[in-house]
Image (tube, grey):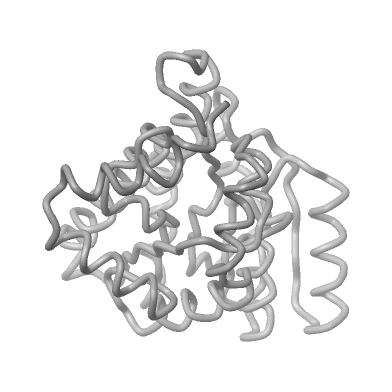
Amino acid sequence: MPTALITGASRGIGRAFAVELARRGYDLLLVARSADQLEAVAAELRQLHKIKAHVLPCDLASAGAAERVAEWVSTQAQELTVLINNAGYGIWGRFEELTLAEQQNMLQLNMHLPVALTHLLLPALHRQPKAYILNVASTAAYQAVPTLTLYAASKAFLLSFSRGLRYELRESGVSVSCLSPGATTTDFADRAGMSAGLQETANKVSMTPAQVAQAGIAALLAGEAEIIPGALNKISSKLTGLVPKALTEKIAAGIYEKHLK
């Protein structure tokens, strides 16, 4: 059976990916920190869709996490066909006021883990007639976002990494895509430490994790390079490329900075 590996699979968009792929008949390898949440997702999908679902509780920002996941995958899947680098988070605040340690931890999860997992698992993906890599970025990848400075930069890195790797693999059976959601009803804002005012603003235009996952998986399997779910997100991302960078940064700062204490 075709098998998909999903990082950050216990909740939010990662969980929604698992639901969508199970619905399509994929066996699942699910990785995240929470053992209880992972097993609950796996048990539900085994029951509903009669697929296999294995879980690996793991702190993906820890040293050696990518190697541990890759070794586990080699023992669980004969046909790894989809790799979804979904795990990641943001931290809200001014760069110099946030601790270096917490920002480096975020960069480890958002950037270094996807690179390492992709490198380690490409041999397995190449063994399939057709395979897919989906890196989950953000609409923040398309511009600098003051007070989410390193988060936006890490997502811009993922977008660039995805496009470069996609070209390198163009004559292989491995297709690389990058998914850039906008505001989504997950716990992103809580974990990032955002204010209630910002959450209320985001909620007005948020998509659900299921909507993002459904659009993302459909476009991934269709071989699309850049996936921006939602008409408003598509328009805003296109406009960002046309407007002077200083103006987009000023607009973003106006949204986020005013809510800082």
Instruction: Give the residue at x 23% y 55%.
Output: 165
Q: Position of residue 123 (x, y in %)?
A: 38, 54
Q: Position of residue 116 (x, y in %)?
A: 41, 38
Q: 204 or 183: which is nearer to us?
A: 204
On-image quarter of the C terminus: top right
Q: Quadrant of residue 71?
A: top right
> From the viewer's perspective, is residue 98 above or below residue 159?
above
Quadrant for the N terminus in the image:
bottom right
Is 29 left, or right, of 175 in this rendering? right
Q: Look at 59% across and 51% down and name the residue there.
A: 7
Side of 51 relative to 199 (left or right): right
* Residue at left offset 79%, top offset 54%: 38
Image coordinates of residue 128 in percent, x first then y, are 41, 71
Q: Which of 78 and 219 lies nearest the eye of the viewer?
A: 219
Q: Is residue 104 above or below residue 253?
A: above
Figure label count: 0
Q: Is residue 230 left or right of residue 54?
A: left
Query: Residue at the spot x=86%, y=72% of the render?
Result: 44
Q: Position of residue 191 (x, y in %)?
A: 65, 39
